Image: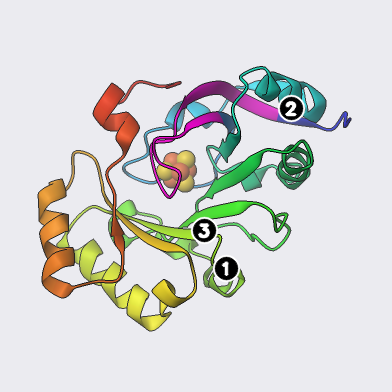
């Protein structure tokens, strides 16, 4: 077991709110810190603070919940270099592991057993210049790519990126999600249908259930 430490904001058991495993009981490991400042961020409480924990202790705590799925999230998990060791350890322990990442960090060191859920930041996130487009070539069918859409401008930009990189042919799912409180969900649904886009519309399940509450 590893003594390598990471700074952790919280570890909790909930239903996966997004992506392919939506609705499945999952343990979330939220790493502290993020170099981005997206306008719609709902986890700013993870920017600072946290508790130092060894990978052995994290793994032990995760095992205590008895779930099969583990989601490593943030903040931006990859901002802590030891995150890649944590991901590999969780895979070694037999969990189905996913990683939520902003798309601003190099994903090449991530263990190939991990399902990567990567954002491409849209113009209205305020962080579009942080996208590391070379990550796209590393994504595979086990992975997912997510756009959080704040406006019609964002939608048109995201639609262009799907076509430009043929994203639907690279990853398991291209996810389009309305930014909670910025864009009516039904508006995004209608645009996707109008344009017959090869993407998956999604609502954040945990927001429907618990609103903006942290740790659920
Ligand atoms: S990358 Fe994620 S955690 Fe970081 S500011 Fe953006 S939404 Fe928040």
State the residue position of label 2: 59
**What residue is drawn where x is 22% and y is 70%?**
156
Q: Is residue 211 visible?
A: no
Quarter of the figure with residue 53: top right
**What residue is drawn where x is 58% and y is 23%?**
11
Is label 1's Cβ within 8 Å of ligand 1? Answer: no
Callout 1 environment at 10 Å: few (<14), some (14 to 19), or many (20+)?
Answer: some
Q: Position of residue 71 (x, y in %)?
A: 56, 38
Q: Position of residue 176 (x, y in %)?
A: 30, 57
The range drawn in magenta is: 7-27
As helix, strand or loop, the secondary structure at mark 3 comes to loop
Whether residue 20 is in magenta: the answer is yes
Quarter of the figure with residue 83: top right
| Real-space CA distance between mark 3 and mark 1, rounded to the nearest whole angstrom | 15 Å
As helix, strand or loop, the secondary structure at mark 1 comes to loop
State the residue position of label 3: 103
Callout 2 environment at 10 Å: few (<14), some (14 to 19), or many (20+)?
Answer: some
Lateral position of residue 110 relative to residue 155, left or right: right
Is label 3's Cβ within 8 Å of ligand 1? Answer: no
State the residue position of label 1: 140
Seen in the picture, residue 140 relative to 19 is either above or below; the reply is: below
């Amino acid at each position: 077991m590893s003594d390598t430490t990471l700074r952790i904001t919280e570890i909790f058991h909930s239903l996966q709110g997004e992506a392919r495993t939506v609705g499945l009981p999952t343990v979330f490991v939220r790493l502290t810190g993020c170099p981005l400042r997206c306008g719609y961020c709902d986890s700013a409480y993870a920017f600072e603070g946290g508790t130092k924990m060894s990978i052995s202790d994290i793994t032990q705590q995760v095992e205590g919940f008895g779930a099969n799925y583990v989601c490593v999230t943030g903040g931006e998990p990859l901002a802590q270099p030891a995150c890649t060791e944590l991901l590999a350890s969780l895979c070694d322990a037999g969990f189905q592991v996913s990683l939520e990442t902003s798309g601003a960090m190099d994903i090449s060191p991530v263990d190939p057993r991990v399902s990567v859920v990567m954002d491409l930041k849209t113009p209205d996130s305020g962080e579009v210049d942080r996208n590391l487009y070379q990550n796209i070539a590393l994504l595979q069918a086990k992975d997912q790519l997510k756009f959080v859409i704040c406006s019609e401008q964002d939608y048109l930009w995201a639609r262009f990126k799907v076509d430009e990189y043929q994203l639907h042919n690279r990853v398991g799912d291209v996810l389009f999600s309305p930014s909670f409180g910025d864009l009516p969900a039904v508006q995004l649904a209608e645009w996707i249908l109008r344009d017959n886009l090869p993407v998956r519309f999604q609502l954040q399940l945990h927001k429907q259930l618990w609103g903006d509450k942290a740790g659920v």
